Amino acid sequence: MTQRRAEISDASSIAALSIEVWLGTYLKRGINGFFADYVLSEFTTAKVETIIADPSEYILVSENEDGIDGFIRVSFGSEGPVDGCSDTEISTFYIQPRHHGKGIGKALLRAASDHCKDQGITSVWLTTNSENTPAIEFYHRQGFRQIGETHFRLKDQAYLNNVYVYALD
């Protein structure tokens, strides 16, 4: 397992991994058009290419001999949804489910944290669905602290998310 900064040529792999993780995490009872339309419009190669090229975004990928198995995206200049957030967000943190428990998430978080510390950043924040127990347990084990709640909004729907902060000291 190696970590490296994402390149434009990684965009389609990152988009496919995002679709896999998002659908597997949030759609437990089937896929309907409402969510399929969102996923297929949100996680595209073109959108990922734009994010990779944006200097206010930092994407680090984990790679094994067959390809990308996880990534972390840090967004600089991102306004937090509650008081106590810095302006640096871990906006996406996805590991393929079959690679959970192999240390990939810890390694990506450590490397992204080191990058942020090198930039003089003292804390980062993220949100996760309040029902995503495996992610919540992972964040707690790594030292994240819940500081509030917000909602992920998709058209007229709202889904409760927890807001966590992580000190980089």
Image (cartoon, rainbow, N blue to C red):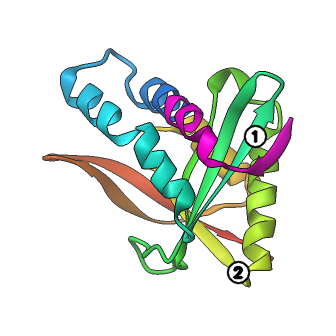
Residue 29 magenta-highlighted: no
Instruction: Tell me the amino acid under the disc marked 1.
Output: Ser
Foreground: disc 1 or disc 2: 1
Looking at the image, which residue is at 81% across and 77% down? Answer: 169
Instruction: Tell me the amino acid under the disc marked 2.
Output: Thr
Indicate the position of residue 150 as horizontal and vertical percent values. 35, 61
Indicate the position of residue 140 as horizontal and vertical percent values. 67, 52
Front one among 57 and 157: 57
Could you tell whether 165 is left or right of 50 in the image? right
Q: Is residue 111 above or below residue 158?
A: below
Q: Is residue 101 above or below residue 98?
A: below
Q: Which residue carries the number 1 mark?
A: 62
- The quadrant of the rendering that contains the N terminus is top right
- The residue most toward the bottom is 120
Front one among 91 and 101: 91
The magenta stretch is 1-16
Residue 83: which quarter of the image?
Answer: bottom left
Q: Which residue carries the number 2 mark?
A: 122
- Disc 1 crowd, CA 10 A, few/some/many (<14, 14-19, 20+): many
Could you tell whether 7 is left or right of 29 in the image? right
Indicate the position of residue 19 as horizontal and vertical percent values. 46, 30
Indicate the position of residue 116 as horizontal and vertical percent values. 72, 72
Tell which circle, 1 or 2, labels the residue nearer the N-terminal end: 1
